[in-house]
Image (tube, helix red, strand yellow):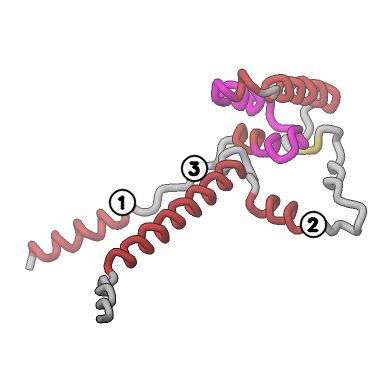
Amino acid sequence: MLSRLLVICAVVATVLGIGAPAAAARPCWKDLVDDYWLDNRVDKVYPISCYRDAMNSLPLDVRNYSDVQDDLRRALLAAIRDERDSDGGSEFRSAAGEVPPPRATDDEGGKRGFIPEVIDKLGPKNASSIPVPLLVLAAIALLLVGAAGVSYGARWYQARRIPVAPPEPRA
């Protein structure tokens, strides 16, 4: 009886002790990089440490082959200037201190073609998503593998067929 009570207490203590860990907050530099990734500009003003963390966290090839470092440095300087002008102010606001203008759409009342709509749906939403060219290459690879499978199946089916004896010559 005592051993059962000890086992039950141990199980309850383990379940209560393990519990779901608190979800870690997403670092602000990732939000900054995602903001930049949407339209190649920083639309909000982030804490100054976020800019520095974002510039230090970028992969080497992104630093070497794009102008993201320059754009982030420019946004950092604008954030420092805005902070000095407004004596701190709020952490997240638009770079000009107002709501950023909406993204431009086509002249046809916002209607776009089928292909741009599909690309917007499939395209990258943030810096850590899969790029569209990689998705296209994966689709082409799957089509080629499927075509090879159909070809292999057709050859296998033809080899399995019962050979027909040649007709007997007429005498």
Q: Amino acid at mark 1?
A: Gly
Segment colored magenta: 34-61
Quadrant for residue 16, please give it: bottom left
**Which of marks 2 and 3 precedes in the sequence?**
3
Q: Callout 2 environment at 10 Å: few (<14), some (14 to 19), or many (20+)?
A: few
**Which of marks 3 and 1 precedes in the sequence?**
1
From mark 1 to mark 3, how far is it between C-alphas? 18 Å
Residue at image mark 3: 24
Foreground of the two, 10 or 50? 50
Foreground of the two, 136 or 88? 136
Residue occupying the point 71% across, 40% down: 38
From mark 2 to mark 1, how far is it between C-alphas? 55 Å
Q: Which mark is residue 33?
A: none
Residue at image mark 2: 113
Please give left or right for residue 82 compared with residue 134 in the image. right
Farthest bottom residue in view = 171
Q: Amino acid at mark 2?
A: Gly
69 is higher (above) or lower (below) than 30: above
From mark 3 to mark 2, how far is it between C-alphas? 40 Å
Please give left or right for residue 38 compared with residue 134 in the image. right
Q: For the C terminus, which image quadrant?
A: bottom left
Residue at image mark 1: 17
Circles 3, 2 touching at the beta carbon (< 8 Å): no
Foreground of the two, 10 or 42? 42
86 is higher (above) or lower (below) than 115: above
Q: Secondary structure at mark 1?
A: helix
Q: Callout 3 environment at 10 Å: few (<14), some (14 to 19), or many (20+)?
A: few
